[in-house]
Amino acid sequence: ITYANSRASDLFGFTEEEIQRGVNGLQGIAPEDRPRAVALMERRRRGEEPGVVEYNGLRKDGSVFPILFHAGPLIRDGRLVGLRGVIVDLTEKRRAEAEVRTAGERVQNFIEASPMGILTYHLEPDGRLVLIGANPASGRLLGVDAGQLVGKTIEEAFPGLVGTEVPERYRIAAAEGVSWRTDQIVYDDGTVRGAFEVVAFRTAPHEVGVMFVEVTERMRAQEERARSEERLRLATRSGRVGVWEYEPATDTLEWDDLMYQIHGVDPARAPDGIGRWVERVHPEDFPAAQASFLASWEPGAAPFDTEFRIVRERDGQVRHIRGMAGVVRDEAGRVIRAIGVNWDITESKRALEALLESESRFRSVIEQSNDAIYIILQNRFDLVNRKFCEITGVTPEEATGPGFSFWSLVAPESVPLIEERRDRRARGEEVPGVYDFVILAKDGRRVTVEASVTEIDYRGQKAVMGLLRDVTQQTKLEDQLRQSQKMESIGRLSGGVAHDLNNLLSPIIGYGEMLLEDFGKADRRRESAEEIVKAAHRARDLVRQLLAFSRKQTLEFRAVDLNRLVAEFQKLLRRAIREDIHIESVLSPSIKTIQADLGQLEQVIMNLAVNAQDAMPEGGRLTIETGLQELDAAFASTHPGVTPGEYVLLAVSDSGVGMDAQTAGKVFEPFFTTKEKGTGLGLSTVYGIVKQHGGSIWVYTEPRAGTTFKCYFPVRGGASPEKERHPDSGGRGPGGSETVMVVEDEPSVRSLAETVLRRQGYTVLAAKDGKEALSILQARGGKLDLVLTDVVLPGMNGRALVEEILGRFPQVRTLFMSGYTDEVITRHGVLEEGIAFHHKPFTVRPLTAKVRAGLGGESGRGGFPCLFRTGRYTE
């Protein structure tokens, strides 16, 4: 940090002196968020814009608090030199969000528990007024199941209102915000009967809320009872309704006890006449209230019904009052008496305002969510948030429109899953609350989402609320991981059969080569023996390909310039690839050397080139590219098995037929092939070689769009020890007269080794395990020149046997052999520098050459002493 304003210093607790001395920016971020911050910084360094990010901030005193962080690049002389950012403390925002949730619950509880009927209508663009909500009290007051009316127009739900002013009053309230009240609506449609007191007011743009109570009994009482009974009933019925009576001729105003309580006036000191009321009305509301009151006196005018504020005399509180009144006229039509009621509606107004504010906050929270959220009411989307629209590609107006269907968002393959869940719920069965399905977005994108669905009470009805989380990338990573694990399992299986196959091939190749030595060139049996040896060699090569796939073959690492290799190998490639295929190379001048087996890299290029040729039956373009690439943490997070670092890229591309996703997912599996005569080992061999070099390989392809294989080899120093190689040719090889012991548990391999060495002139001793070998050696008094032992033996393994022999008879030379994979051999401690080792299956000449070298070559002792010292074999 090179600069921070005073607010930032106060927020994180650092002084200006500390900032001037230098503060690491990561000190202001909680440890668990620092890796993500570093990754986002790296993206900004590459020119990407991650946008606004939320972290847990860390103050100097160790306290953690939520922050919002946004930064832009600081460019000087065309070069990125830093970032200039803004940090917002989210502590109060989080606290406010919690308060919003609490307030929303309170408002919902109020609506549900309210004794007044509450209906909510939505004014559609075409003028239809659709009922979208009804609380439990509305159903009780109307004597019907109000939930069955939701979704209908006002005319469909209440046909008795057709031709009355009520629907139009509601529309005006929804469209213009003009509230409307009436003290009685007499209604009878054959199902719903009664008289109701109603107030209508706008609750949201294009929405109107209707609060009502039934006044049927009150109307009957007004018709049947005297004025005093009428006043008493009004006061008793309302509970907190004050009743008054005014005679204009004498300016006489009578209040009941509740009127005095509501206005906070002491009856003993209250002024006489209308002035008692005038003094208490809020000055700002008095003109309108007075005008409304006097207007109700006009012939044919509606009764007095208005809201106004009062200032209580006792405590100065401002309260909201609902006032309603009617007049009594004489025979001449003059007003002789006005009778009215007042009730304190302060709390109900506050509740209504809180309800509206809560709904506004609720929508705000939903809009800010990183998950898609929707609410389905009466089989229609009633609410969708911003993230929902991003995932599906539809607008809020489209989603909540009358013609929009949830099923239009579901990909065909996910329809059976959702239908099954629906049917199981209909049967009363439990279904998991969280499940995955595929959304088919409006723009054609396929998005895998994790859905969490639950039923909620919404606007007095049962609704479905769903949360959708985009897990497309996570699903791809899981598929890649499963594919990687499958390849590893196949590799272990391939490596596991190597030992048994090698033990079977050793006698076939060995005895076959000895037959060829015995048969003269004119012997007709020689041709059959040659075919046997050729078939065995092909089988051995097949095992080697399996070992290459399973990454168990022995490699000879050295520093390799990939550009030079491609340039030199392209000449050979040109002779191997059809002439109707144009070969070009794009070699980066900035690559670095890698540690690799030269021959194996040539095999990678050849196999990929041949595979590309087969994908272009009518000719095309084959491109070989190299480059130096930095694979960062972001790349590694989406490509399992990749370690961030610097890599040399080898890419082989063709303009051929390409592959679909299902085929591309299997191309590296052994024996999988789309060719009529293919073995299915070409690409699996490439996969194994790349993996054994510590690299990774990825295929990019689409049908009719060609294919690209990208191989990444890590840049690292130091070459692995080179393994000694011997030509795998026939012939008798060098011999001798020394004594050699063969220790091998497989009888056919042990017999072959005995036969080969005796034919070379050696004295051969044989043992099936370590115990028998030590017994023979002890009986001979240690008179032995060389022991040839298998690595894996029953009871005592080859390493332990050699340690025992050298401990007793240090002059004995040793030579290991095995058909197991390098992994198994390494586990037994054999594959180390300075240790003589020979792979199975062996042929005659390489075996005899190894034995001769172990005994000291042509001149006697030397070769492979392999003395055991301090836990390691060294020369």
Image (tube, rainbow, N blue to C red):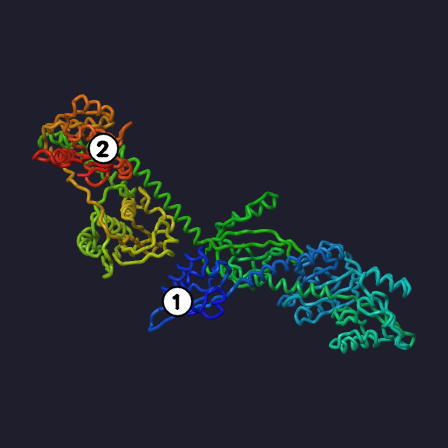
Within 10 Å of the Cα at label 1, are there few (<14), some (14-19), or many (20+) other Cα atoms?
Answer: few
| Quarter in which the C terminus is drawn | top left
As helix, strand or loop, the secondary structure at mark 2 comes to helix
Q: Position of residue 183 (x, y in %)?
A: 79, 66
Where does residue 66 sit, x and y in percent of width and height?
51, 60
Q: Is residue 140 left or right of residue 85?
A: right
Check disc 2 and give the amino acid type: Leu
Q: CA distance from mark 1 to mark 2?
A: 73 Å
Where does label 1 land, which residue? 21
Position of 341 relative to 480 (above/below) = below
* Drawn side of residue 719 relative to residue 263, left or right: left
Count of residue discs:
2
Image: 267 above or below 575: below
For disc 2, the neighbor class at 10 Å (few under 14, some 14 to 19, many from 20) is many
Identify the residue shown where x is 38% and y is 46%. 483
The answer to whether residue 528 is visible is no
Residue 715's x, y, as percent? Answer: 27, 54
Left or right: 578 in relation to 475: left
Badge 1 or badge 2: first in the primary sequence:
1
The residue under label 2 is: 505
Q: Looking at the picture, which amino acid does disc 1 mark?
A: Arg
Residue with the most extreme front position: 17
